[in-house]
Image (tube, rainbow, N blue to C red):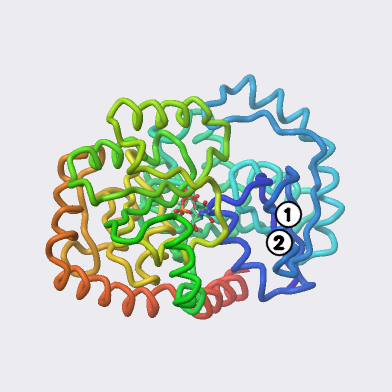
Amino acid sequence: MKILFLDQSGKPGGAELCLIDIAKPYGDRALVGLFADGPFKDLLQQNNIPVEVLATQEIQVRKESSLLQGFKSLRQLAPLITKVVKKARKYDLIYANTQKALVVGALASFFSRRPLVYHLHDILSKEHFSQTNLRIAINLANRFASLVIANSEASKTAFLQAGGRRNIIEVIYNGFDPKTYQPDESDINKLQQQLELQGKFVVGHFSRLAPWKGQHILINALAKCPPEVTVILVGDALFGEQEYVQYLHQQVTQLGLENRVKFLGFRSDIPQLMSVCNLVAHTSTSPEPFGRVIVEGMLCGKPVVAVKAGGVMELVEHGLNGFLVTPGEPEELAQVIITCLQETEITATIANNARTTASLRFDVATINQQIAQLLSHRL
Ligand code: UDP
Ligand code: GLC
């Protein structure tokens, strides 16, 4: 089967990293068409996945767009749609991985008469999107998609609640290669020295810097923890959240935590960095659709604390394979950090359980088989 994947982003967010794993087995039978240039293209090339940047100018629709803006951008999209229609004729199906890709993919599917699959990485609710964007996504998926793959039950439920058709949607979790998350001991030690983290209790946060990812909650929690607790913030503002970055730096200064918080920017050595942590924290203030970082933390054998909302509830069972806290509650988060610092034996058992179950549940080979089966049976 030849697949034309579409993704709007030039930057590697979670949806894009997931796409790499899905497209890889198809080799030359796949093409990833991007709507923006950037480091995601390089990553695809490094993974030997054919890629082309199809759009020459940025598409203006934002998560909060109005109908009028939507129509304006549709005009702007015409050349891109024409290009995608031409490409699509050489492939068996169009696989839209983001919302703008769904818009382009739906029209291209209509004109090229190729089936459309939509990989839904978002919780389609008013908390995350404007009414207009929700309506566009649901109507296009209902009308044009033969299959919607939701990244969690939470994303599926939101899709149905927003009016999505039940008979087109299936849940498939992100897949991971457990081997990737077992880095060399020597690399871990080197990194620990470079970052001057010896003797510290390191809490790692791995996410783009964006208000809803809640890095500020972790900083507030840190202020309530003993002095040996240190935070590393791994990730950058991927989609223009510069104000939030400034806010985080100010918050750190105001709380006098300059020596206990390290901003490491975007990194590609996540398994190594997670391995220098004592705890991986997830703090999103809006429901997380899936949360790759949670599974990655588990695969690295680290205890994970995450917020009780969205897809996270499908990944973490409190006290069994991780810890759950109320979103937006630094006090509760600080309590869990302190428990992990003190109760090392129980915490290690929980982390080991998590590693074993996550390796089985999210194994990329099995997940890719499930996707291949769905594509061949449903299309
Ligand atoms: N990530 C990364 N480098 C960074 C920060 C994050 O490669 O500096 C990766 C992280 O390991 C995870 C992904 O980005 O695989 C983020 O995915 P997640 O589902 O947690 O959140 P998203 O940003 O997609 O909402
Ligand atoms: C999106 C979601 C994130 C999910 C990722 C991969 O970026 O925000 O929760 O893990 O897609 O499905």
Q: Secondary structure at mark 2?
A: helix
| The N terminus sits in image quarter | bottom right
Report the front residue among 146 and 195. 195
- What residue lies at 34% left-to-right and 39% top-to-bottom? 286
Report the front residue among 323 and 51. 323
* Left or right position of 342 against 378: left
Q: Which mark is residue 44?
A: 2
Q: Secondary structure at mark 1?
A: helix
Report the front residue among 314 and 150. 314
Q: Are marks 2 and 1 in contact (CB under 8 Å)?
A: yes
Q: Which mark is residue 41?
A: 1
Expressed as whole percent of the image width and height from the top left, the position of residue 299 reads: 39, 72
* Left or right position of 12 against 296: right
Report the front residue among 170 and 345. 345
Q: Is label 1's Cβ within 8 Å of ligand 1?
A: no
Expressed as whole percent of the image width and height from the top left, the position of residue 152 reads: 40, 58
Q: Is label 2's Cβ within 8 Å of ligand 1?
A: no
* Left or right position of 324 against 48: left
- What residue lies at 73% left-to-right and 58% top-to-bottom? 32
Number of marks drawn: 2
- What residue lies at 38% left-to-right and 80% top-to-bottom? 360
Placement of 96 over or under 177, stated as above or below = above
Q: Amino acid at mark 1?
A: Lys
